[in-house]
Amino acid sequence: MTHRGVLNKVVEKYKMSPEESTVFIKSFDKELNLSEKQKSRWYGKKCIGIYEIDHLEKIESFYYNREKNMDDWVITDNINDIKK
């Protein structure tokens, strides 16, 4: 882990058609500032989540107890509960 922040806003869409997901992503064009390559990757997805994070701050790196389904996000009430 290198940063922490406060999740401020969550917008999730499910079961979208390719056209609906393209419109959804375009509606956040300014905020996302995606490259053309990123747009082509995300346009057409059935499920998309957009998360706004406030108070982003760098933290000292550390190792944590990795569970089976911990991919990109780690959600915990107390970081000390998962530190090695």
Image (cartoon, helix red, strand yellow):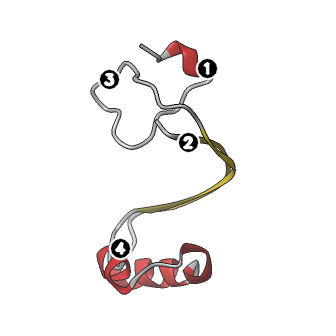
Residue displayed at 42% across by 77% down: 21
Q: Is residue 55 above or below residue 61?
A: below
Kind of residue sitting beneath label 4:
Trp
Q: Secondary structure at mark 4?
A: helix
Q: Which residue is mark 2?
A: 3
Residue displayed at 61% across by 82% down: 30
Kind of residue sitting beneath label 2:
His
Q: Nearer the viewer, residue 12 or 3?
A: 3
Residue displayed at 43% across by 81% down: 20
Across and down, in percent, residue 40 comes to 31, 82
Near mark 1 (Cα within 10 A), the count class, few <14, some 14-19 or many ≥20, is few
Near mark 3 (Cα within 10 A), the count class, few <14, some 14-19 or many ≥20, is few
Q: CA distance from mark 3 to mark 1?
A: 16 Å
Near mark 2 (Cα within 10 A), the count class, few <14, some 14-19 or many ≥20, is few
Q: Which residue is mark 1?
A: 78
Q: CA distance from mark 1 to mark 2?
A: 15 Å
Q: CA distance from mark 2 to mark 4?
A: 24 Å
- Which is more N-terminal, label 4 or label 2? 2
Kind of residue sitting beneath label 3:
Glu
Is 61 on the left-hand or right-hand side of 18? right
Across and down, in percent, residue 69 comes to 31, 32
Across and down, in percent, residue 12 comes to 52, 59
| Numbered label attached to residue 42 | 4
- Which is more N-terminal, label 4 or label 3? 4
Q: Nearer the viewer, residue 57 or 37?
A: 57
Is 37 on the left-hand or right-hand side of 52? left
